[in-house]
Image (cartoon, rainbow, N blue to C red):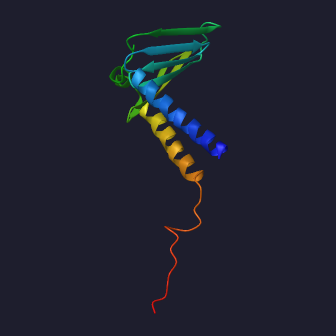
Amino acid sequence: MKFRWCIRGFAIALLTFCLSVWGWSYFYYVHIAYKSYEVETYTGGVKFRVDNIEGSASWWFDHGHRPLLSLSNLMNNANWRFLGFAYQNWSSPPRMIRDIAIPFWFPSLLSGGLLWFMWRQTRVEMAGRGFPVEVVQAK
């Protein structure tokens, strides 16, 4: 029983985290970079960037009150976009930069689906259906 509630608690915490970050992204931004990898939140989503030329050799972190990017700014130059997802390839040899954007509704939907699946899988199975009623023959 405790194991079942630990699994459910994890799924509920994950859903709460995803929904909180989704709402939080409309007022604040976070930008984290390490070598040639970057993660940045924008209004309603998260953007991942991979650069083949390494930047600094250490971690870099920045945050602020107003999101730097909006979905419309990110989507204007995208090579591929669909329902808030975007892919952009900046090709100018020798540098190759790739951006992938994921809207926050997607991880929220996935974590909600995980919660539903875990709830269904960890429920207690009933012995029978309905209330236990005995059938009495009429005299």
Point out the residue furthest to the front here: 139
Q: Is residue 67 left or right of residue 111?
A: left
Point out the residue furthest to the bottom here: 139
Query: Vertical placement of 70 versus 8: above or below?
Result: above
Picture residue at 57% right of the left edge, 13% below the top:
33
The reply to whether residue 88 is in sight is no
Q: Is residue 66 left or right of residue 95?
A: left
Q: Looking at the image, which is closer to me, 5 or 133?
A: 133
Q: Is residue 33 left or right of residue 84?
A: right
Picture residue at 54% right of the left edge, 9% below the top:
61
Q: Is residue 115 left or right of residue 54?
A: left
Quadrant position of residue 5: top right
Q: Looking at the image, which is closer to me, 101 or 14?
A: 14
- x, y (%) of residue 112? 48, 41
Query: Vertical placement of 8 versus 126: above or below?
Result: above
Q: Looking at the image, which is closer to me, 91 or 82?
A: 82
The reply to whether residue 135 is in sight is yes
- x, y (%) of residue 63? 47, 10
So how many labels did they put on this image?
0
Query: Vertical placement of 58 versus 136: above or below?
Result: above
Query: Vertical placement of 113 versus 85: above or below?
Result: below
- x, y (%) of residue 123? 57, 53
- x, y (%) of residue 132? 53, 70
Picture residue at 59% right of the left edge, 17% below the top:
52
